[in-house]
Amino acid sequence: MAHDRNRRRVDRERSAPPPSALGQGLKLAGLWTAGLLCAAALSFLAFEKVAAGDLLRIRSIEVRGASRATAAELVSLSPVKVGDSLLLADVDAMERAIARHPWIASATVERHLPPAIEVRVVEREPFALVDLAGLYLVDRTGEVFKRADRGDGLDLPLVTGLRREDYLAHRALLESRLKAALALLEEYGREGLGPLAPVSEVHLDVEEGVVLYVGDRGTEVILGQSSPNRQDWLDKLTRLHIVLEALRAEGRRAEVIHLEGRPDRVALRLEGSGSEKGGAGAGSALARERGAREGPGRRRGRDAPLARR
């Protein structure tokens, strides 16, 4: 009987299946997962402890590149403050908040050790003023970014002739007109006219087109309707340069210079004169400079003064 019991025990041991490789793998994977979760939890707790500790609290916020905006103004806009955790500081939100300041075109925020935040800003460069039922600053791209204040201390050309309600209702169209006026100002500077007769105003007139007021006496320069052809503006500015140089050489001033019309003619109304002249004085200099076939001008018979708009 004892022999039979031993045989049954041996038979049972032989019949028991060996542990599978899959089961062992799952067991090991579970152990690894549990270990990783424990390590992650410990790392998170350690990070929280370090982040919340005094060792990595922001000690200062430095602002670089600001001249129009003050550091205090920019820091006041920031969601990140001195004393906050350096590691937990939302620098992206800080950049967006600071860039909302009207003078700021862009902002970049960096963390530094010892714990500090450095903010580098690029400010907008005002290029002109635009009258939209109040004076506003506009940059070279045509971005109207700030209402002008006396404290801004800026002496800039003024763009007029745009109505605020039209600007709000048809923004894309009027922005294109504003950009064209700014492009004209840039061409005026490249032509070298700024030192000779700086622009005080660019008026966008419905009937007469673009009208400039230049020099210390506000000489009215009628360029005419805006043209998509850039060369048309360049030709007119070249003619204007010749006219102004000729007037200065003769010691005379013009109240009105009319450049619309034939490319070889200029209509003038001189200071102290009640009539308009074509080709006289500065006009003859223009004709010589451009090699025009016709001789210097003639009376045009328009005695009515050209009204400044």
Image (cartoon, rainbow, N blue to C red):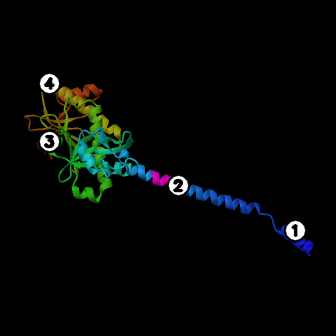
Query: Which residue type carries mark 2?
Result: Ala
Q: Residue at x 66, y 58 (%)?
A: 29
Q: Earlier in the sequence, mark 1 or mark 2?
A: 1
Judged by depth in the image, the label closer to the viewer, 3 or 1, is 1
- In this view, the residue in front, 242 or 108, is 108
- In this view, the residue in front, 149 or 277, is 149
Picture disc at residue 150: none
Judged by depth in the image, the label closer to the viewer, 2 or 3, is 2
Name the residue carrying label 2.
40
Q: Earlier in the sequence, mark 2 or mark 3?
A: 2
Name the residue carrying label 3.
302
Judged by depth in the image, the label closer to the viewer, 1 or 4, is 1
Q: Earlier in the sequence, mark 2 or mark 4?
A: 2
Picture disc at residue 10: 1
Q: Main secondary structure of the magenta part?
A: helix
Q: Picture quarter containing residue 303?
A: top left
Q: Earlier in the sequence, mark 3 or mark 1?
A: 1
Judged by depth in the image, the label closer to the viewer, 1 or 2, is 1
Q: Secondary structure at mark 3?
A: loop
Q: Position of residue 117 (x, y in %)?
A: 34, 43
Q: Position of residue 280 (x, y in %)?
A: 17, 30
